[in-house]
Image (tube, rainbow, N blue to C red):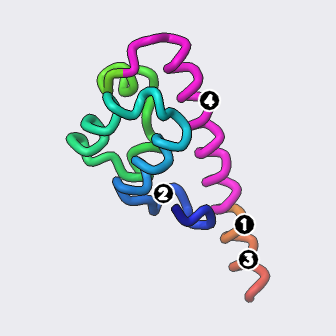
């Protein structure tokens, strides 16, 4: 997976790669759900706890771990957006 690619631009396949890297023990149940619901990077960034439960992540501890990792992805996405904005202003 291209580490420099913005999360919001990830394909379903790239989301699957991220989940495999982060949560190999959860991969069996998440794989089918991610494909079934066509979860791209943009959708991944919007997931909340009730979405995780619907995807099969039922244990509270696992949900909290995933939500923390998703928050980190959201923060990185925000940083990238701000960087793009600043770069655009400097180009003027």
Residue that numbered label 4 is attached to: 68
Out of 9 and 61, give the one closest to the viewer.
61
Q: CA distance from mark 4 to mark 1?
A: 23 Å
Number of numbered discs on residues: 4
Q: Which residue is mark 2?
A: 8
Q: Which residue is mark 1?
A: 83
Disc 4 to disc 2, C-alpha distance? 17 Å
Determine the secondary structure under disc 3: helix
Residue located 27% across and 35% down the image = 33
* Residues tagged 4 and 1 counted as in contact (Cβ below 8 A): no
Q: Is residue 67 above or below residue 2?
A: above
Majority secondary structure of magenta residues: helix
Look at the image and say whether residue 60 sits in the magenta stretch.
yes
The residue lying at 48 percent from left, 57 percent from top is: 8
Assign a secondary structure to mark 2: helix
Q: Nearer the viewer, mark 2 or mark 1?
A: 2
Which callout, 3 or 2, points at the residue further toward the start of the chain? 2
Say which label, 4 or 2, has the lower sequence index. 2
- First in sequence: mark 4 or mark 1? 4
N-term mark: 4 or 3: 4
Image location (x, y in percent) of residue 38: 26, 48
Q: Residues within 10 Å of mark 2 (few under 14, many from 20)?
A: some
Identify the residue position indicated by label 3 in the image: 87
Residue at 45% from the left image edge and 11% from the top image edge: 59
Nearer mark to the viewer, of 4 and 3: 4
Q: Magenta stretch: give its range.
A: 57-81
Q: Which mark is residue 14?
A: none
Query: Where 65 sits versus 27, above or below?
Result: above
| Tag nearer the camera, 4 or 1 | 4
Q: CA distance from mark 2 to mark 1?
A: 15 Å
């Amino acid at each position: 997976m291209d580490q420099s690619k913005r999360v919001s631009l990830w394909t379903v396949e790239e989301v699957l790669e991220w989940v495999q890297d982060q949560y190999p023990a959860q991969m069996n149940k998440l794989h089918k759900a991610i494909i079934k619901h066509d979860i791209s990077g943009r959708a991944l960034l919007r997931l909340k706890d009730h979405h995780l439960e619907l995807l099969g992540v039922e244990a509270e501890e696992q949900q909290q771990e995933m939500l923390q990792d998703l928050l980190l992805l959201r923060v990185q996405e925000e940083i990238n957006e701000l960087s793009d904005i600043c770069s655009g202003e400097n180009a003027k």
